[in-house]
Amino acid sequence: MSTNPASEHPFKRVANELRTEILRGDLAPGDKIASENQLAERFGVTRATVRKGIALLRMEGLITSHQGKGAFVRERPHVNMRQTGSIYRARRATGEANYNAEAKAQGQVAKQVIREVVETAAPEKVADRFGIAAGAPVIVRRLLFTVDGAPMQLVDTYYEPSLAAGTPLAQPKLIKGGANGFIENPDGPIGRRIVQFIEDLDIRMPYPHEVELLDIPSGVPVAKVTRTAYDSAGDVLEVQDSVIPCDRHTFRYVIDV
């Protein structure tokens, strides 16, 4: 709250009080916010002022409103992505895709939905990581990741045709154990072990199609994570671009030095 509440605009005072209650946990995810009439009486303001305060909290992604039902504290599935080699190998040992296994370890259910699997021209940044010319053909798997039914990530994973053509990586279906499990399977057609990931992280505001597909509230940025996977020879096996809303993930990197 402001150190001088009397100087606040009335709608900001409404928003600040409710925000404090949400962040403090007095109002839990899924709880219904008091009605406009109740809030107007509580704060001694008009219903129009209450609506402006609610709109501010909606823009911040703290609440959602449903026509005829009122406003509710937004429920947000949250995944803690812990990036260490030992955790990656532990998740791989489950036989599940790494993201699914990580979510399951946190008591959640993750699923992937295939948007498309096609051959396309390599974007410049992807081509640079593969060491090929921009526009050269690559195979891309475009997936939507969900947790407990809520959209969490848009994930585009690129492969060179010399690696992926004629394999499940190039087919529009989910791969049991995930793409990395298929690549590393010693009895499979590729059989190459991933020994290093390098991730580049950019923070930006989402594009309109990302807002729609990921149900991103106004004012919430996304993390654009570009992850490059290398084998023991230093060759790039895949390049993955993920668009991740910043209000539903925590990234933790452990760096041994």
Image (cartoon, rainbow, N blue to C red):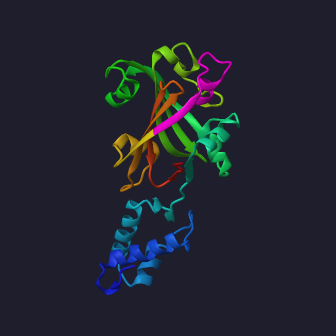
Which residue does the image show at 48% across and 61% down from the upper left?
68
Query: Horizontal and vertical percent for residue 163?
Result: 51, 17
Q: Nearer the viewer, residue 11 or 100?
A: 100
Query: Horizontal and vertical percent for residue 189?
Result: 61, 15
77 on left or right of 247:
right
Figure check: 157 above or below 248: above
Magenta stretch contains residue 6: no
The magenta-colored residue range is 179-198
Which of the 4 image quarters holds residue 194? top right
Figure check: 138 above or below 44: above
Which residue does the image show at 38% across and 60% down from the upper left?
59
Figure check: 140 above or below 98: above
Position of the N terminus, as image quadrant, is bottom left
Query: Horizontal and vertical percent for residue 253?
Result: 52, 50
Query: Horizontal and vertical percent for residue 231?
Result: 53, 27
Return the residue found at the far right.
94
Figure check: 252 above or below 155: below
252 on left or right of 59:
right
62 on left or right of 32:
left
Q: Nearer the viewer, residue 109 or 99?
A: 99
Question: Is residue 226 visible to the viewer in this orientation of the structure?
Answer: yes
